[in-house]
Image: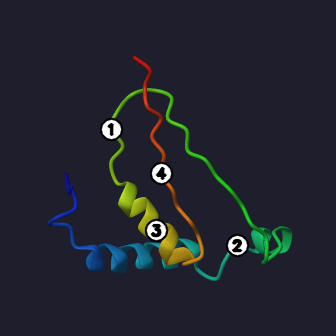
Amino acid sequence: MNYYKDFDFRKAEILIREALEEDLGKGDITSELLIPPDSVSKAELLVKENGIIAGLEIFRLVFRIIDRNISVKFFKKTEKK
């Protein structure tokens, strides 16, 4: 099912870029001092209960805007019955 069939990703990207620019401004001096520019990080979002997660493609879009080299992957653990 395509939940995004009527979603305007161009408008979303403009809004996300504006929000990031407002939030990040000229950057974060602490991060710039402590995190090497060539560092690589990994993050995991763990959901412990059954439910519906909305906005995964928007989540991916935000990180793609920040850095096209960021890889976002989603995995679904299947339940044993």
Where does the image place residue 78, in percent across and percent down from the top left? 43, 31
* Residue type, label 3: Val
Q: How is the image coloured?
A: rainbow
Disc 2 and disc 1: Cα gap in Å?
33 Å
Where does the image place residue 3, in percent across and percent down from the top left? 21, 55
Camera-nearest label, 2 or 1: 1
Report helix, strand or loop for mark 2. Answer: loop
The residue tagged 2 is 28
The residue tagged 4 is 74
Q: Residue at x 47, y 35 (%)?
A: 77
Q: Earlier in the sequence, mark 2 or mark 1?
A: 2
Camera-nearest label, 1 or 4: 4
Where does the image place residue 62, in percent across and percent down from the top left? 46, 68
Q: Nearer the viewer, residue 42 or 31?
A: 42
- Cβ atoms at labels 1 and 3 below 8 Å apart: no
Instruction: Count the numbered circles shown.
Output: 4
The residue tagged 3 is 62
The residue tagged 1 is 52
Residue 39: image tag: none
Q: Residue at x 14, y 66 (%)?
A: 6
Q: Residue at x 51, y 56 (%)?
A: 73
Q: Earlier in the sequence, mark 1 or mark 3?
A: 1
* Residue type, label 1: Ile
